[in-house]
Each structure stands twice: as C-alpha cells, then as structure tokens.
Amino acid sequence: MRRGMTLAYAHEKRKRILQELRSDAHYRATDTIYYGEHDPFDVPLADCGTCGGKPTVRKVSAKPIRWRAVCGGCGNQHKAVSKWPWLAALNWNGINLASQDYHAFPMFGLSTLDPDAAREVVASIRRDLELRKALAGIETTIARKTGEISPPGRTYQQRLEAYLQWAMLALRLVKAEKMDQREEPHSKTKDRAQELIHTTCG
Ligand SMILES: [Zn+2]
C-alpha cells in the first residue's frame, strides 16, 4: 500500500483503470488474454550464456527469504536477488538469452510469428497485465482501508506478476532475434571478405 494515497484518489484511479480495461479500444488492442496452459511459476532455466553450464536456483538469505540462480559451471549470476524462486529463474533467463528462442516460448502463442508480429502480441499482453496489476494494487488498498470490496487474492497477484515477467522476457528475446537478423547481412559480408582474403592468400 502506498503511503499518502487518499481513498478518493484510490477510487478515482480504480475507476480509470476499469474504464480502460473495459473499453473497446483496449479490447481491440489486446490480441489475447489467454496465455496458454503453462504454469507461469514453472520456469525452465536457460543454459548459461557464458559457459553453457546448468544453473540452479539457491536460497541466498532466509530473513527475508531471497533467491538467486547461479551457474554451476562458472558462477555467473544475476546481480539482483529475488523474492521468489520463479522470479530468480526468470531474471536468470533474462540475462542468458543465447540458448533461448521466442518461437519456443511456452506461452503467448508466438511459435509462428515473425519478430514484429510477436512484439505486437506481447506488447499488448504486457499492457493488459500492467493494467490488471495496477487494478489489483488499488483494490488491495481500498479493501484494506474500507472493507467495501474484497481484496484480490495473493496468488492471483503473484500470477499477474509472473506473467508480466514472462512477457518482459519474451520482449527481450524478440528484440535479440531482431538484432540478430539485422546483423546477419553484416556478418555475411565480413565472412565473404575473409573468404576473399583466404583466397587471395592461398
Ligand atoms: Zn556459466
């Protein structure tokens, strides 16, 4: 709960978020709110981008409980510690993109999409999730202060957060794919130049 947020402001903000969530424009802009069957708390860890090793998620502090994924091979790890093991895993995946492909993403239906289309789908999902997360936060505040509405469940809020982090990871992977595509002609030119050098030297 944010300190200093007046009840009137909270109600006003809730009204505005609900208006946007229920608007035709939002409905049209949101490709899907179906994310697939995959449990968002189940995060398969990507191989280490530095050494190709397998990471594990470890508890790094007990009070408060914090988690971090660490590579068993080279000790590579994310700088930040996480509140939940699944978040530590997603953070790890976010800095070890090389062994992942957004086409194989376990949610959001990206398998057949090119990077531009995939980015559009995930960006719309992210916007939807951000609104729902903001709404859940406001409703928690109102519920605590007044009891007029029942607060959104903790698991529901954590699921929103998890899906949001998955969406951020998907956007990173799409961006990386696009950069690879842009660099490809470049590196081919370089390869050809090297071939020429070899031919000339040989
Ligand atoms: Zn490693």
Image (spheres, helix red, strand yellow):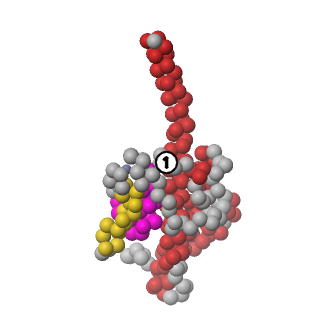
Quarter that holds the C terminus: top left
**In the rendered structure, does residue 94 fall within the stretch colored magenta?**
yes
Q: Is residue 40 above or below residue 76?
A: below
Instruction: Work out whether residue 189 or residue 115 is closer to the camera in this orientation and state it.
Output: 189
Name which residue lies at 53% across and 32% down: 184
Q: Quadrant of residue 16?
A: bottom right
Any part of residue 124 in sight: no
- The residue at the far bottom in this view is 147
Q: Quadrant of residue 148?
A: bottom right
Q: Is mark 1 within 8 Å of ligand 1?
A: no
How busy is the neighbourhood of tag 1: few (under 14 within 10 Å), some, or many (20 plus)? few
Q: Is residue 109 above or below residue 190?
A: below
Instruction: Work out whether residue 145 or residue 59 is closer to the camera in this orientation and state it.
Output: 59
Q: Looking at the picture, how far across and down is residue 145, in whole percent?
A: 45, 85
Q: Quadrant of residue 30?
A: bottom right
Name which residue lies at 46% across and 84% down: 144
- What secondary structure is found at the residue carrying circle 1? loop
Q: Is residue 38 above or below residue 145?
A: above
Name which residue lies at 63% across and 53% down: 110
Q: Looking at the picture, how far across and down is residue 163, in whole percent?
A: 54, 64
What amino acid type should be assigned to the residue bearing mark 1?
Answer: Ser
Any part of residue 184 in sight: yes
Name which residue lies at 50% across and 84% down: 143
According to the picture, the residue beneath numbered tag 1 turns out to be 99
Q: Which residues are magenta?
A: 80-96
Q: Looking at the picture, how far across and down is residue 31, in whole percent?
A: 66, 58
**In the rendered structure, does residue 125 fall within the stretch colored magenta?**
no
166 left or right, relative to 55? right
Q: Main secondary structure of the magenta part?
A: helix
The number of numbered badges drawn on the structure is 1
Quarter that holds the N terminus: bottom left
